[in-house]
Structure formats: C-alpha cells, structure tokens
Image (tube, grey):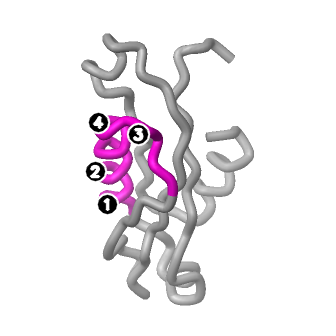
Amino acid sequence: MTPELIDANRKLTTYAPLPQYPPLALARHAEGSGMFLLHLRSDGIVERVDIVQSTGHRDLDEACLTVYRQWRFVPSFAAKAHKVKMPVTFSLKIP
C-alpha cells in the first residue's frame, strides 16, 4: 500500500492491520499484486471479502483474505460506502 492509502485508511478505519508476508511465500520469494473487494456492514464490520484480482499466489491471497476480514470501518463511512477496493502488493524489493 502507498503511504497515501495507509493514511486514508487510518481516517476511515478503527482497526486495520496490514497483510503480512506468509513465511513460506517469503522463503519462495513469491511476489505479486492483487485487488480485494471488502463488503461492509453499516456498523463497520467487514461482512465478506472477494478477490477481484489474485496476487498469483494462493498463500498471499489467503493472507489478505484473513487480515481484511478483521478490518473495522468507521460506521458513518461504512453505512455510505458499502464496498471498498483494497490494492495490495507483496514485493521483496526495498522501497
């Protein structure tokens, strides 16, 4: 995620841990970018997460699905938005 996206998420979420590199994917040097669609309840809870675009690696996708299900959004935002697209990139390159 870009710093701008992380900053925007802080304003719209009450709990938003970032996806972490799964150890086996890290050991295999797996990299990839994907897009996930979070379906929000009006109380801010993530009801469902869909893969819009896979990262190309099952374990990277699963890491995103697991963490995005835990996210909690500000209810006033969730009641209006209903859905949020979240891009993700797993890269071994140091920025």
Label 2–label 4 contact, CB within 8 A: no
Residue in the picture at 37% in, 27% down: 21
Q: Secondary structure at mark 1?
A: loop
Q: Position of residue 69 (x, y in %)?
A: 31, 60
Q: Looking at the image, do the residues carrying marks 1 and 3 touch, with CB atoms under 8 Å apart?
A: no
Q: Which residue is mark 3?
A: 19
Q: Secondary structure at mark 2?
A: helix
Cα separation between marks 2 and 4:
10 Å
**What residue do we see at 52% from left, 77% from top?**
83
Q: Residue at x 27, y 19 (%)?
A: 23
Looking at the rendered structure, the secondary structure element under dot 4 is helix
CA distance separating discs 4 and 3: 11 Å
Amino acid bearing label 4: Asp
Q: Which residues are magenta?
A: 53-71
Instruction: Give the distance between the C-alpha atoms of the residues marked 1 and 4, in whole angstroms.
Output: 15 Å
| Residue 53 horizontal/vertical position (percent) | 51, 54
* Quadrant of the rendered image containing residue 15: bottom left
Q: Which residue is mark 1?
A: 69
The amino acid beneath tag 3 is: Pro
Can you tell which of label 2 and label 4 is closer to the viewer? 4
Looking at the image, do the residues carrying marks 2 and 3 touch, with CB atoms under 8 Å apart? no
In what quadrant of the picture does the N terminus appear? Answer: top right
Work out whether mark 2 precedes mark 3 in sequence or the reverse, and give the earlier one. Answer: 3
Q: Earlier in the sequence, mark 4 or mark 3?
A: 3
